[in-house]
Image (cartoon, rainbow, N blue to C red):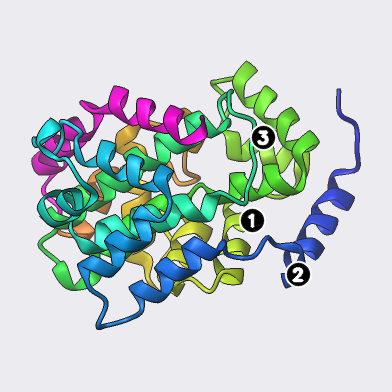
Amino acid sequence: MLIFNKLEFSQNFRSILEQAGQIPPFPETARELLKLRNNPDANLEQLVGLIEKDPSLAAFILKYARMSIFGYGSRITSVHHAISLVLGFNTALNLTMSIASSGCLKLPDHGALGRVRIWSQTLECAALCRELCHIMTKKNLINCELIYLSGLFHNFGYLLFGHLYPKEFSYLNDLVTRYPGQDARSLQLQVFGITHDTIGMYLIKAWDLPEEIAIAVAEQHFPDYSGKHSPYVKLIAIANRLLQSPVLTDGCPYVDTLILLESLGINELEAKAAQEKVQGCQSEFLTLAKELVA
């Protein structure tokens, strides 16, 4: 059993997070994709060229675009087809940027908090966030591509935890795997005094990603948050609740999901349909996650 001082560990961890040089830099491919994202004149050919420079990214985009949720299957034969016919420029860019970003962060492959489980849940959450955003009647509250990116990055605190403290993270992974009924965030607080949402916020800020993502990551377990960019927090919380992820229970069970849906202008029946659409592809998301960590 791992024995250490929780207060000392959390203070040391925060000290490391506050030193920019201690956090892995944004990977080069991800940086190029971010530049493209911030370039108003960026075009499809530039994005295809960047993705095709990395065979693993290109293969992933092809497989993602062939998922049953989109209905194209094997008719998608190129990265260009995947983006132009199925995913769209922004979704493809955000998806590949998140995957490229994770390359510098190492985790165990298996367990409740292993890379396979984390990536599977991440892909599902991001997909559901996007589906829910498209059925919102209050369109001005959220940018659908930013909430999709928030969903893709909301678990990155786990990745940084495992990268900086592999021994301690393996212990946490083992605890969450052995006690599936326990809330993973509560276990993190009890054992380490710091949680993945706080860790993730530092990472997002260090990588200079949009403020909406940093706040969504930091407050993801508190849908009663009412500060700046609160709709992003609420939608991440809704997606995780609908997906019923046992390791991502939020800290506000007293906040009714229906009230959260109404606050964003989302019809309950339409939300249920979106949930079923995404959950119907769980095995495909799991397969993609396994290929990502292979």
Rendered view: 194 above or below 93: above
Badge 2 marks a residue whose secondary structure is helix
Name the residue beneath numbered marker 1: 199
Closer to the chain start, of discs 2 and 1, is 2
Identity of the residue drawn at 46% across and 28% down? 246
Circle 3 crowding by C-alpha within 10 Å: few under 14, some 14–19, many from 20:
some
In this rendering, position of residue 10 left or right of residue 147: right
The kind of residue on which mark 2 rests is: Gly
Name the residue beneath numbered marker 3: 187
Q: Nearer the viewer, residue 45 or 118?
A: 45
Question: To which quarter of the image does residue 239 belong?
Answer: top left
Position in image of residue 233 (x %, y %) = 39, 59
Q: Which residues are magenta?
A: 266-294
Identity of the residue drawn at 80% across and 34% down? 167
Do labels 2 and 3 touch, CB within 8 Å? no
Position in image of residue 188 (x %, y %) = 68, 40
Badge 1 marks a residue whose secondary structure is helix
Mark pair 3, 1: CA separation? 15 Å
Rendered view: 131 above or below 178: below
Q: Is residue 104 visible?
A: yes
Identity of the residue drawn at 15% across and 53% down? 266
Question: To which quarter of the image does residue 289 belong?
Answer: top left
Q: Is residue 142 visible?
A: no
Mark pair 2, 1: CA separation? 15 Å
Label placed on residue 21: 2
In this rendering, position of residue 31 left or right of residue 108: left
